[in-house]
Image (cartoon, rainbow, N blue to C red):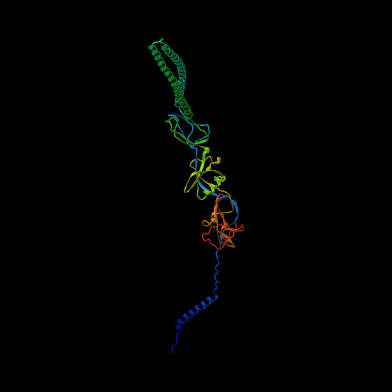
Amino acid sequence: MVVLSKSRVKVILWPVLIILAGVVLFIYFSSTKPVQEPVEMKEKVWLVETMPVVFENLSPVHRLYGKVESFSTVNAAAPVSGVIDKVWVKEGSYVKAGEPLISMDLTDLDIPLQQAKADVADAKAQIALQKLVDKANTKKLAHENRVLAFKKTNAERSLQLIQKGLVSQSGLDEVEEMLVRQEYVVVGATLAVEEGGVKNKQINARLLKAQAKLTQARLNKQRGQVVAPYDLRVMKMEVSEGSRVNEGSILVQFYGIDSLELRAKLPVTILPQVQSALNDGVALEAFYQQGNNARVSLALSRLAGEATTSGLDAFFTIPVGLKQTRPGDLMEVDLQGEPLENVVAIPYRALYGQDRVYLVKEGRLQAQVVKVLGEVLRDGKLWALIDPTVGNVAVDAHTKISVTHLPNAMTGLKVSEVVQ
């Protein structure tokens, strides 16, 4: 029989005890560990802002972009060749009606005027002279006619005497020769009288031509002193003092302050409504938002005579409040259309695509098809103008629309309204 020593027993006993202790500890920790409750899956709730459906009678607005133009841009030209004497304005100057702009040297303007006056005086003198000639020719014709009558009487008397044998044939021939010569003299006198009538017409025509030149010379002298015909602004200066210009050379370019208008393109989508309103005599206006939050009204004056594939140009009158604008300025205006009944205004962030919004029904989203009718201004921002009754869901004043744009929005999505 084998007897184990104490040291041998210790070597075997310690590992057994360690294993037993580990088993006991494992059993203890397993029996005393906390029990984890089952995980409950909860549906996520999305926070959204809502707005009630408010039916209103509103006029849609259409944002237009246009350019300021002038329908009376004037290019003042030199009426004659000459030298610029004075220049009172500069490019961009505002000039009131009656104030001078440019003046040409008066010598260059007076010389044609004096020549025209001389031509008129000469034509009048020729008319007076021709009247004297006509008077003399008329008297001469009358005298020659009386002489012709005497010679005819003498010829008739000579013919009677030759029949009685009291005068020879040579004497009769001599009398008839004198009669023929006198008839020729009468023809010449008659021609002189008729020529006088033609010459009178020629001289009168020259007088009219000279008077026209005189009128033109006076106009040229007036036009050589360029004066503002109305309140205007100088666009461009082409000359300076001392410049020599030819007839027809541009001196200055300007436009009337009251001639400014805005030219904006009307899209083809709203053109029928605008044309219909104009045909019915409805006055349409566009509004321009100034920096100080003041809205300025621009009346629609007319439509362009030629359309393009992108639309038709419309012209809006620039009011007094925007007279500081200049041709070439770009403006953004909102054209206000005819009022629509029972429409709803919503911010664009509430609109999905072109024709869909989401209603909030019992804490969940409900898709609703709508019809976009235009835009309207709210607090200086453009909102969509819609008809929400075209969809399948009934809409009334108690219905709320989600105005928070969710990328995962869909029918049935659970939401919670944010309390403002």
x and y percentages locating residue 300 in the rendered image: 54, 44
Q: In which quarter of the image is the N terminus?
A: bottom left
x and y percentages locating residue 163 in the rendered image: 41, 12
Observer able to see residue 49: no
| Rendered view: 87 above or below 133 | below
- Identify which residue, 361 or 407, lies in the foreground: 361
Disc tally is 0
Q: Residue furthest bottom?
A: 1
Describe residue 76's horizontal placement relative to residue 399 as left or right.
Answer: left
Q: Residue furthest left?
A: 170
x and y percentages locating residue 91 in the rendered image: 47, 36
Residue 77: image quadrant is top left
| Rendered view: 127 above or below 19 | above
Observer able to see residue 197: yes
- Identify which residue, 369 or 381, lies in the foreground: 369
Q: In which quarter of the image is the C terminus?
A: bottom right
- Identify which residue, 220 or 22, lies in the foreground: 220
- Identify which residue, 284 or 100, lies in the foreground: 284
x and y percentages locating residue 94 in the rendered image: 51, 36
Q: Which residue lies furthest to the top in this view?
A: 166
| Rendered view: 177 above or below 378 | above
Q: Which residue lies furthest to the right in this view?
A: 398
